[in-house]
Amino acid sequence: MVVRTLSAALVFFVLIGFLVGCASVDVTKTGKGFYNPTDPNEVEILLTRPDKPYEELGTLIVQGFRTSETAKMHNAIRAKAAPLGANAVILTSQGIVKGDFVSTMWAQGVAIRYKTKTEDTQK
Amino acid sequence: MDFKDQMYGFGATKTIACLAMLTLILCLLPSCAGDVANRYYGKMKYPPKEPGEVQILQERPARPYEVIADFQSRGETPEDMRRRAAQIGADAVIISRLGGLYSTGEEWAGSDSYRHTYSRITGTAIKYRD
């Protein structure tokens, strides 16, 4: 009985997960020190290196978005890069995972912060 | 169908349920730390402190400070970061919760209904300069 209940609960949560739609973002810090979070709305998504001097803060891997949801995936990257204090994320690679029913998209990038003179002295 | 047949019938389901329970139990264990990676920058060693003497901060303090170490790991809490900071004699540790789940139903970059979830926690250990 307990096993049945647990199995039903597991199936329920898996179904809810599919219906609600959940992606995941993994962030690894590579920089030194701490910066206050930035506004996610202002985080830039770049495909090339910017001309301005910058510092790398960390790497991001996002996965679980449908292939038609590229802009939503960019917003997820913005939302999860902002707590690191990022001004922009440079996307370094992207791909598609083909499933039986639904294909999903993944992307990897580097969160960066533009250098300012005042912040160089204290991180 | 006797009891043995029933057990065979539920074999796969049982395995899935047991794996789910095992994962849940493992994740609930307080010592579920993973990918623990620390860096120490201090030029000198400081005597350890009691964890209660170390401040937990969520943003940069206004007072001047020096960064002496960075911690990061999975499955830990701000209290774990504080304990680690106390071991190296830090005055405070600044916490960041990074990554986690993200709802594909979100439409605004500024909103994240899964903000409370995180896949990694970081702590920056600092010593005040004054």
Image (cartoon, coloured by chain):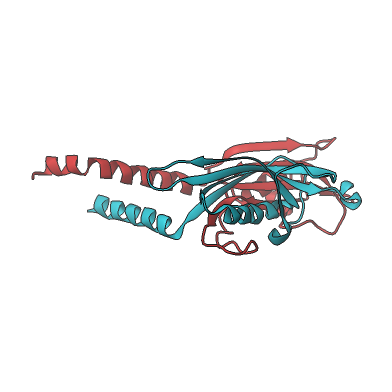
Chain colours: A cyan, B red
Q: Residue at x 30, y 53 (%)?
A: A6
Q: Residue at x 71, y 57 (%)?
A: B58
Is residue B102 visible in this depiction of the protein?
yes
Is residue B86 visible in this depiction of the protein?
no
Residue B52: x and y in percent read 69, 54
Q: Is residue A81 left or right of residue A6?
A: right
Residue B40: x and y in percent read 76, 36
> Relative to B48, is B65 above or below?
below
Q: Residue furthest front?
A: A68
Residue B16: x and y in percent read 32, 43
In the image shown, does A58 or A64 lie closer to the viewer?
Answer: A64
In the image shown, does A123 or B90 lie closer to the viewer?
Answer: A123
- Split into 4 quadrants, where in the image is the N terminus of chain B? top left
Q: Residue at x 26, y 41 (%)?
A: B12
In the image shown, does B87 or A86 lie closer to the viewer?
Answer: A86
Residue A3: x and y in percent read 26, 50
In the image shown, does A26 or A23 lie closer to the viewer?
Answer: A23
Q: Is residue B47 left or right of residue B64?
A: left
